[in-house]
Amino acid sequence: MGRSRTARAHRATDEYFGLSAEGTTVRAEFVGGTTTFLAMAYILFVNPQILGTTGMDVNAVFVATALAAALDSLVMGLWARYPIALAPGMGLNAFFAFTVVLVMGIPWQTALAGTLVSGVLFFILAVTGIRGVLVNAIPLHLKFATGAGIGLFIAFIGLKNAGIVVASEATLVGLGDISRPGTLLAIFGVLVTAAFLIRGYKGGVFYGLLLTATAGVVTGLTAAPDGVVSSVPSIGPTFGQAIGSLDQIWTTEMIIVILTMLFVDFFDTSGTLIAVANQAGFLENGKLPRANKALMADSVATMGGAVLGTSTTTSYIESSSGVSAGARTGLASVVTAGYFLLAIFFSPLLAVITPEVTAPALIIVGVLMAQALGDIEWGKLEYAIPAFMTVVAMPLTYSIANGIAFGLFLYPIVMVLKGRWRDVHPITYLLFLAVTGYFIWLI
């Protein structure tokens, strides 16, 4: 009787996810989902560290991060049926914390409300099909530059947290005290994480974080945690704050914030979906089947994450590691979701995750994101100039929004000067006018 039920369950799983059709098995999907989790598990500790700088409750953010990743990966796996996992995105969490809250002075509750609204707008774009128009309107080189610029911004934050880069009255920034114990710990973490990745370990960033945290405890730089497993912390301090602050978003500043969140999430998600789908062999005539479902799943993730209490939740490029390990269907995302759900019981480990411990992860993730620089045609100045300004403006002005604005401002100008004004999409000219107003009235 038991074998019969097991056989029926296997058949049902096979039929629902299309395992046989994709040439995969339950075991292969389990291995792929596990690999994806290990590749992106660092976000469980890095995200609370980043959002905690805004005054948000770190334990609540930890639970919100785990739940958002679990629930939203389930949506992607069960509905869109792709082996793509989701979690609060790197770059967008830095924008949320360091630009929106700490620089612009917007309360984190209001920032969460903005995140929620950006998710709603993303959903509308996915449902109505406007997505395609916008994807074609933004120059490809600015998309590459945005990803690379966010990478440099994240790495800069990591270098600052490590004490490797410090403030300087003479030169704005300078080299910190390398002999400081915390800085040495961060440098150790960078080397260890790099070693894992160079040797081909898919979860290298996560392994590096754990080993760095362990080294901190062993050397006495950080206190040992009270335990490893505990009851689930309360999510109360962050849950529902986005809904309660919706009446605060009707300002020009917040509209800019919402559009920036939407822009970055939209193109980051599109790029991730295409990259992972291409690797898995899903593309049909260059198009992604069920693309709208995948995009809607991502937008639902952003909305759900905001309500739980975290910054924009998005599709993770680390899902490609799971695909390389054999994942081909949404079952892998369900497996990844299960791991994130279990993670909510490991909150005591947050005690050993200091800024020096997370700094290596930020730096290495920055390196990985900066690979997009290689896709920019630097030999053509009409592409190179706006792309370069997009990239450097993000870390140097400490704002992702400023970097995007620089690129959208310069691109139409240099294309007109080149005599290629017809090659600029009409929507790009409208964005030029919008960012011109941004520079004149908001900065």
Image (cartoon, grey):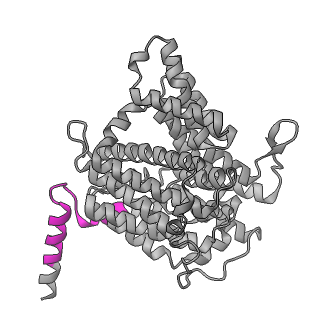
Residue drawn 83% across the image and 35% down it: 171
14 within the magenta span:
yes
x and y, in percent, of residue 221 in the image: 77, 67
Residue drawn 32% across the image and 64% down it: 75
Q: Is residue 28 visible?
A: no
Q: Residue furthest bottom?
A: 1
Q: Nearer the viewer, residue 195 or 366?
A: 366
Residue drawn 56% across the image and 25% down it: 410
Quadrant containing the N terminus is: bottom left
353 within the magenta span:
no
Give the left or right position of residue 358, taking residue 329 as reference. Answer: right
x and y, in percent, of residue 305 in the image: 46, 64
Residue 225 drawn above or below residue 367: below
Residue drawn 41% across the image and 31% down it: 427
x and y, in percent, of residue 282 in the image: 24, 46
Give the left or right position of residue 242, taking residue 192 as reference. Answer: left
Q: Main secondary structure of the magenta part?
A: helix
x and y, in percent, of residue 211 in the image: 62, 64
Q: Is residue 437 visible?
A: yes
The segment highlighted magenta reads 7-33
